[in-house]
Image: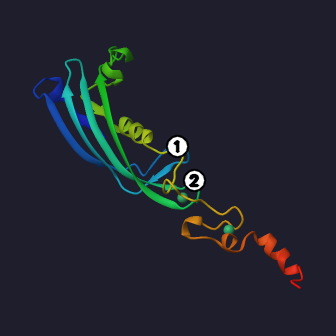
Amino acid sequence: MRVHVANLLEATAHTLEVAGRLDLGCLDGPGVPTVLATAVEVRAKLSATGRGVLVVGEAGTVGVWECSRCLVRYEHPLAARFSVEFRPPGEETPEDGPDGREVQTFTGQWVDLLEVIRQSLILDMPMKPLCREDCLGLCQECGGNLNQGSCPCARGGDPRWQALGRLLDPK
Ligand SMILES: [Zn+2]
Ligand SMILES: [Zn+2]
């Protein structure tokens, strides 16, 4: 997602607002690549800093995960804010960034927001995806999804003991 910033650099404009959609398809997060169910909606405000361009914005989309407990696939929104200052090469010393703001370099009249957006969304990804906070997971015995009610094991006890029970003479 590239933005033409010539007007900001030439100080004919102080700020510039952009909005758009980015079709990323999937994102490489902490685990396996996460498929995105929707395009990424991006809004950003660009302003001239004298030496470069400050970009502050937000990005949102919906990711598809597999629950780490019950293995069910579920969708969950991702929302991220980003703040990055683009400076010409040679002026990118990281300690220059106020408030730990990220500093990147750019040349010419365009800044590319793609990597900033991608990284900010990855930071919002869950380390351990859960379909819900109190997901009960799968039964250790039969593999049934315990979120969908109790499985036969819970009702009748351990199936191995049931088999043994049938061998015993009730009399
Ligand atoms: Zn789950
Ligand atoms: Zn079970």
Q: Is residue 144 above or below residue 80?
A: below
State the image coordinates of residue 13 (x, y, percent, origin top left).
11, 29
Q: Quadrant of the C terminus?
A: bottom right
* Residue placed most toward the observer, 133 or 73: 133
Question: For disc 2, does the CB lie below 8 Å from ligand 1?
Answer: yes
Q: Amino acid at mark 2?
A: Ser
State the image coordinates of residue 71 (x, y, percent, origin top left).
58, 59
In the displayed structure image, the side of residue 147 where residue 90 appears, left or right: left
* Residue placed most toward the observer, 95 or 104: 95
Q: Residue furthest front?
A: 171
Q: Which residue is mark 1?
A: 127
State the image coordinates of residue 115 (x, y, percent, origin top left).
39, 36
Residue shown at 51%/53% (left/top)?
130
Q: Which residue is mark 2?
A: 68
Question: Which mark is on residue 107?
Answer: none
Q: Are marks 2 and 1 in contact (CB under 8 Å)?
A: no
Residue shown at 48%/56% (left/top)?
132
State the image coordinates of residue 24 (x, y, percent, origin top left).
40, 48
Q: Secondary structure at mark 2?
A: loop
Residue shown at 45%/44% (left/top)?
125
For ligand 1, the image quadrant comes to: bottom right
Q: Is residue 158 above or below residue 119?
A: below
Q: Secondary structure at mark 1?
A: loop
Q: Residue furthest bottom?
A: 171
Q: Quadrant of the N terminus?
A: top left
* Residue placed most toward the observer, 124 or 49: 124
Q: Residue furthest left?
A: 12
Res 167 → quadrant: bottom right
